[in-house]
Amino acid sequence: MSTQKVNLHSALLDCVMFGRSSFFREKRAYALPSPSEIRALNSKSGDARAEDFYRPPPVRIPSLGLLVKYGADVTIREATAQEMVREKLGGRVPVPEVFGWIKDEGQVFIYMQLVQGDTLQARWQNLKEAGRRSVCTQLRCMVDSLRTLPQDDHEYYIGSPCGQSLNDIFLQDRPELVGPFKGPDAIEQFHSACGIDISQHTSILFTHGDLVAPNIILSTDTNPTVVAIVDWAQAGWYPDYWEYCKARRVELDSHCFSPKIQDEWRMKYLPLIMDVVDEEACYHPWLQFVLSKGI
């Protein structure tokens, strides 16, 4: 898609647009491409298939510095979470700027900054030890920053930003599990609903929810830096063990992460990025919850 051009002679979108975003300040175009233009670009590229209504490949338009993520499974809460983190944490956590969003014909379109780089998943096996540890150190600072985000209304709750229900993949299609759970006993409510047998003291902290190698973008130079963390669809306020448990559980692409590399990632490098939770008290009960729900 690197040489694709977009027909920009369309009316302004009836959507949420950030007029002060760099897209409009820099006058890249007077309007964002319409959903029909985005679908046409994907169709023309040959990447999209008829069955990709729920999550087709994102459309990249380098000439506009634009990436459009869209589909029936894409939610506006992802855009609001992404923009909230960018606004509150500034340069401490690199997050692509959101230019706007729209819902059209059952699909949500999120227009955001295109960040050039490679996924950590693609680069990891070719990085030397010093480069790996440098990336882990950078990520640790970012995770620590995310943990400092306070809940706006000063009321304890487990849910997405603005008190909405959770969007975690391990809770999808289970409306009784997604909350939000509010009040001083929010964690107990959540554990009771999910059947998670964790009794030790647990805090509620802001969590990316899917901090895995494909969602970490590195610069393309020899000594890479983390230039973006993407895919904020599952972000929200969770018990403090959730980030680690999710990151350890998710299976990565075996073409880039062989079983040996994945085991090394989990045991050696993941503990450099986030706090490890107790196996017997936290991880095993959480894993039992995941397996018992068939997810």
Image: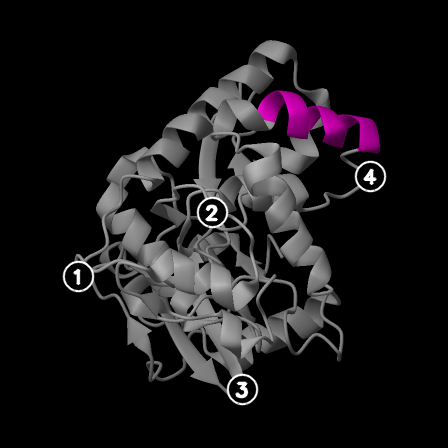
- Disc 1: which residue: 153
- Disc 3: which residue: 106
* Residue type, label 3: Gly
Query: How dense is the environment of label 4, judged by Cα within 10 Å: few (below 14), some, or many (20 and up)?
Result: few
* Label 1: which secondary element: loop
Q: Earlier in the sequence, mark 4 or mark 2?
A: 2
- Specify the segment rendered in magenta: 258-269
Which dot, 1 or 2, sits closer to the camera? 2
| Image colouring | one colour
Which dot, 3 or 1, sits closer to the camera? 1
- Disc 2: which residue: 199
Q: Is residue 216 above or below residue 69?
A: above
How far apart marks 1 and 2 lie (CA) works out to 26 Å
- Residue drawn at point x = 54 percent, y = 82 percent: 36
User: In which quadrant of the rendered view does residue 248 lie?
Assistant: top right
* Residue type, label 2: Ser
- Disc 4: which residue: 255
How far apart marks 3 and 1 lie (CA) works out to 32 Å
How far apart marks 2 and 3 lie (CA) works out to 41 Å
Which dot, 2 or 3, sits closer to the camera? 2
